[in-house]
Amino acid sequence: MSGEALLRVRNLVISFAIDGKDCPAVDGITFDLERGRTLALVGESGSGKTLTAVSILGLVQPPGVITGGSIDFDGTELVGATTNAFCAIRGRRVAMVFQEPMAALNPVMRIGDQIAEPLRAHLGLSRVAARDRAIDLLGKVGIGAPAQRVDNYPHQLSGGMRQRVMIAMALSCDPEILIADEPTTALDVTVQRQILALLRKMQRERHMAMLFVTHDLSLVENIADEVAVMYAGRIVERASVQQILTTPKHPYSRALWHASPARHRAGERLQAVPGNTPGLTQRPRGCPFHPRCPRALERCHQDVPAFDASVACFVPHS
Amino acid sequence: MTEPLVQTENLSQQFHMRTPGRTDVLHALDNVSLSIACGQTLGLVGESGCGKSTLGRCILRLLRPSSGRIVFAGTDITHMSRRALRPMRRRMQFIPQDPLASLNPRQTVTDALGEALTVHRICEKSTVPERIAALCQSVGLGTDIVNRYPHELSSGQRQRLLVARALSVEPDFIIADEPTSSLDVSVQAQVINLLLDLKESLRLTYLFISHDLHVVRIVSDVVAVMYLGRIVEVGSATDLYRSPNHPYTRVLLEPSQASDDVAADEPPNPLQQPSGCSFHPRCPIAKDICKNETPALRALGGDNVDRQVACHLA
């Protein structure tokens, strides 16, 4: 890694108390995010990827609690920071695009007012100036006739347009970090490609750092510089996009890639991963992936492999 | 070519959208003619709102089509009464998209599977538990889960349960509507493999509805592409993916700057069907004729008689 890290996450642990026991949903993860770079956090449901993302904004909801580690954002410690401290950061310096635009947008507020809200709160713009800026932003994210659209309500827009509005909102105050949590999952394929292209363009133009959270490894190729693969609350592999897609080292990264339908021909059986991702209370001993792993050794049942250079595995592929 | 098991002829479905003071007509299906041969899988792709699920629901007669015919195993079922339909319904089953929404939260696995067995008198009452165990096994569910409720199952297990429920009445034909879109990639692969295995071992015929083009390519023998209620292209999976003929199919299959630009245009509102070819406002090669005349689905020349496309310029 080179350059200055804008965000340093170290040994972050986020736990839920279940039946009196602390169950770590995020279990000691470490990563850096640099200006102008995109890190993709890839994992299946329950891997802790979204929880990691929202922890940066101080949005971990009880009963979830950050029980260890640190999140350093440009010199400020965010673990344990006050609500006031977060208010100065959220939407201003770190912004987020959520998965379900319909759930994240206010259905009874015009989209222009929703985009103007952070502008007025953070930048102190007047009503008129904020509206002009909102129209400008709508145009930038590719919405036609922005001067008319600005007065629309969310239900008047298609899914793709709503996601564009979310992006416009996130970009409104020129954030340094953009967190995108499965921003294309709810969208059609054609629209999906378009939103990815827009995010990439905005990230490059503004030299933002982006944390791109997804369950779909086939999306990262076109958007990320680096990939961190998460499984059961841990990062099991971290590498450049090229490396993850050509020579994945962790058996799970490999399995994930091989199970992807994009890699198969008509009529071919997919290479499925046996079993299910373990629930929060059923995390196995040792390496969390060992019950599903084709390469597991005796040792993997007992010991948790440490993260070494790029992979956390006793028997990585070379 | 084997006998078609399912056929639709010029099937149309309109919905009347009433708002105070006016009624808009939404053409969800417009003259859809398709046939699915016995033992084959037809993959149906298209953007959301194009009518793929409506077509599925029409074929199952969960909707009453506005015009056209539906023929199942040689019998016209378009206007069949509910009573007459019941034995037909045993032969055609449905695997829905969202397992939690389509399982009764207060029914255990045994209840969910036993109900269909009893209603259709598939087996003796005394052999029902045995039968349920066998069904669970056939879809890769352990028999230890038979007394669980849906919320106690993982998402993969729930999807398997839906497959088992569809299979319980020994159908010939299954409509799977986005059966894996709620699943994780590693589990999705298990369920797709299961569907492929069952097709072979039970000689099933599928209509597989999905917006995921990769998944459709893997499961389908024949693929039909839908746009705003019309079929715009049909062909064998290998053929269609190798050389898409309709400009819309090309936009879907061949990512490029040009097709991204097309995709950038919002899909049109089905309430305001464009004149002529409904794709013309987004089409990169549209000519005047496309604005005025609706292209019919026609066979393409060459050796492949099954290849059809609805485009003036293809």
Image (spheres, helix red, strand yellow):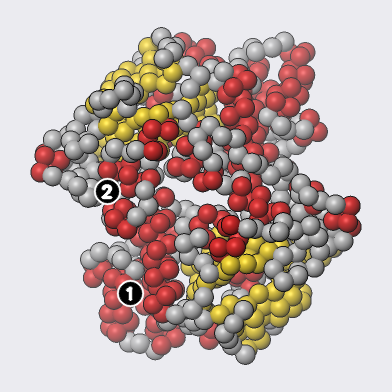
Q: Which residue is mark 2?
A: B268
Residue type at tag 1: Leu
Using the numbered discs, state the Cα–Cα distance from disc 1 to disc 2 in whole angstroms.
23 Å
Q: Are marks 1 and 2 in contact (CB under 8 Å)?
A: no
Residue B77 to residue B145: above or below: above
Q: Quadrant of the N terminus of chain B?
A: top left
Place of residue B87 in the rendered image (x, y in percent of width and height, measured from the top left): 52, 12
Q: Give the residue at the far front of this rendering.
A: A318
Instruction: Give the structural element (helix, strand or loop) at label 1.
Output: helix
Place of residue A20 in the rendered image (x, y in percent of width and height, measured from the top left): 85, 63
Quadrant in the picture for residue A102? bottom left
> Which numbered circle lies on residue A223?
none
Foreground pick, A108 / B42:
B42
Q: Which residue is mark 1?
A: A137
Place of residue A174 in the rendered image (x, y in percent of width and height, measured from the top left): 42, 81
Instruction: Give the structural element (helix, strand or loop) at label 2.
Output: loop
Q: Residue at x 76, y 70 (%)?
A: A308
Q: Is residue B193 left or right of residue B11?
A: right
Residue A178 in view: yes
